[in-house]
Amino acid sequence: MIHVLADVQTEKIGINTSVWQYSIILSGAIIGDNCNINCHTFIENDVKIGDSVTIKSGVYLWDGIEIEDNVFIGPNVTFTNDERPRSKQYPIEFKKIKILKNASIGAGSIILGGVTLGEFSMIGAGTLVTKNVPDRALVIGSPGRIMGWLNNDGTKMESLGDKFIDNFKNEWIVKNNNLEKI
């Protein structure tokens, strides 16, 4: 379903994807199946969006953003792709952003160019992300810091000393700022 008031220039949109009013999607964008692109969004040419992605209102996706399956992007999340922006001066190459499967980004967060958000990671509302986020990390603050580790459903893992226990009773430890199953 593409709303009559949306400006969709790409033909690369999957089945059962909804695009709501006042959205603009440029011709080079690729959007998967079962996505929900809310109103007042803008998607540039060099953007790839996987299946079952939700993009809430007020989100602008600039060139160089790749979003994998089952990602949630909350309202008014801001992405950047130019490290040193100046009017009418463009970089040779824009910074890329990659959002891995099942990640969620809370409302009003800012994601700087050049970062990757890990699988099942969650970015709290209003967080400033300046560096890569590991899989399953809960990141909150400005700048964002890891405040916990998450289960598949987004709930926090139980902390037992230097171990974390998921909701299936699996044990995990943190090594080199990454969570590893033991």
Image (cartoon, helix red, strand yellow):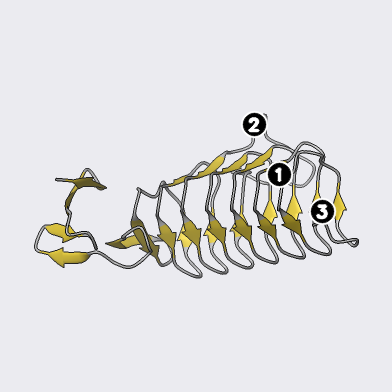
Location of residue 170 by image quarter: bottom left
The disc, 3 or 1, on the residue closer to the chain's N-terminal end is 1
- Residues at discs 2 and 1 in contact (Cβ within 8 Å): no
> What is the C-alpha distance between the residues marked 2 and 1?
28 Å
Residue at the disc numbered 3? 24
Q: In the image, residue 140 lies at what x, y percent?
A: 39, 66
For label 2, the residue is 93
* Residue 92 percent across, percent down from the top left: 67, 29
- Per the rendering, the mark at residue 14 is 1
Residue displayed at 51% across by 66% down: 106
**For the residue labelled by badge 1, is the local secondary structure a helix, a strand or a loop?**
loop
Query: Tag 2, which secondary structure?
Result: loop
Please state which of residues 95 and 41 is positioned toward the viewer in this rendering. 41
Secondary-structure class at tag 3? strand
Q: Position of residue 93 (x, y in %)?
A: 64, 31
Residue at (33, 68) in percent of width and height: 155
Quadrant holding the N terminus? bottom right
Q: Please name the amino acid that badge 2 sits on.
A: Glu
